Image: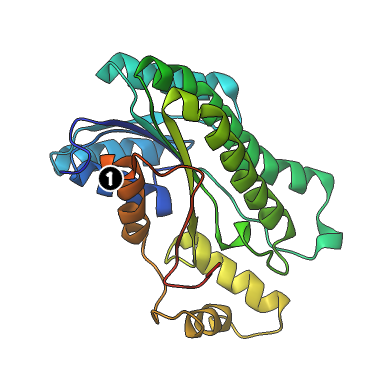
Amino acid sequence: MLLKDKVIVITGSTKGIGKGIAMKAAQEGAKVVASGPEPELVKALEKEFADNNYTGIAVLCDVTKKIDVDNLMLAASKKYGKIDGLVACAGIIDPGHFEDIDEARWDKLMNVNLKGVYLADQAVIPYLKKNGGGKIINIGSDCSLEGWDFLTSYSASKFAVRGLSQALAKELGVHNIKVNVICPGIIETDMWEQLDKTLSELRGLKQGETWSQTVAKIPLGRGGKPEDLGNGAVLLLSDYSDYITGCSLTVGGGSAIH
């Protein structure tokens, strides 16, 4: 087990990519502290941990609120005595014409995708320092590497996450804290299902064509699954990544090669 007895906190992990990472980390022996803003999903995930005999808890957390994020880290430390790693995964997407994105829409996305990462990273650092080091993974996107049409706010937020992570990797190396980014490609989640519908409408395509056209360009010939992201996260959280920091790991079957 690559993560045996490591305590891993994961934001935005009650569904989608975050849940895939949480379940894979638990399978690899981690003590997982999952979180999300929806009470029913938090409760369901904790039950799923128990049903699978995984070690883990799920905590209600809105990543845009500092008190929630601080309490998440405190809950992890109180329950398991330490924190070894963080995956900052909480994120939303809001496709549309740039001219139509008003200030409220812009701020809502940035508060989750960028402020949420800032708050989580900042909150976990004291625990990692106390632990003698650790791992931070911030979740980016293919849009961290190349902006997408009709995803201007999302692309801006994910470029910012990548820049933040690179700067932190340089700043925190002296404390034995490694900071990396995982950049998912197109992944089979509810978010991508809705995104395909909206982007297809914006591009004048039939529903499903955005997905099929994007998959057709992927060298490995398929869209990803949440567990694919889990595999990448396990690598970067494990001891095998102890000399890797400042890296942007693309997990998309070759959808973004840079």
Closest to the observer, 11 or 221: 221
- The location of residue 210, given as percent across then percent down, is 58, 79
Report the amino acid beneath label 1: Tyr
Q: Residue 111 is drawn in which quadrant?
A: top right
**At 46% from the left edge and 17% from the top edge, which residue is drawn?**
126
Say above or below: 75 vs 188. above
Percent position of residue 46, x then y? 27, 36
**What residue is shown at x 34% (from left), y 22% (from top)?**
76
Which residue lies under the disc numbered 1? 240
- Foreground of the two, 81 or 12: 81
Above or below for 105 versus 196: above
Display coloring: rainbow
Q: Nearer the viewer, residue 167 or 160?
A: 167
The residue lying at 64 percent from left, 40 percent from top is 114
Q: Which of the two residues, 146 or 168, is positioned nearer the viewer here?
A: 168
Residue 98: give x, y in percent of width and height: 81, 61
Question: Splitting the image into 4 quarters, where does residue 22 fall?
Answer: top left
Query: Label 1 neighbourhood size at 10 Å, few (<14), some (14-19), many (20+)?
Result: few
In the displayed structure image, the side of residue 22 where residue 114 appears, left or right: right
Location of residue 202 with respect to 52 vertically, above or below: below
For the C terminus, the image quarter is bottom right
Pick the quarter of the image with the N terminus: top left
Kindly identify the residue that appears in the image at 34 percent across and 24 percent down. 83
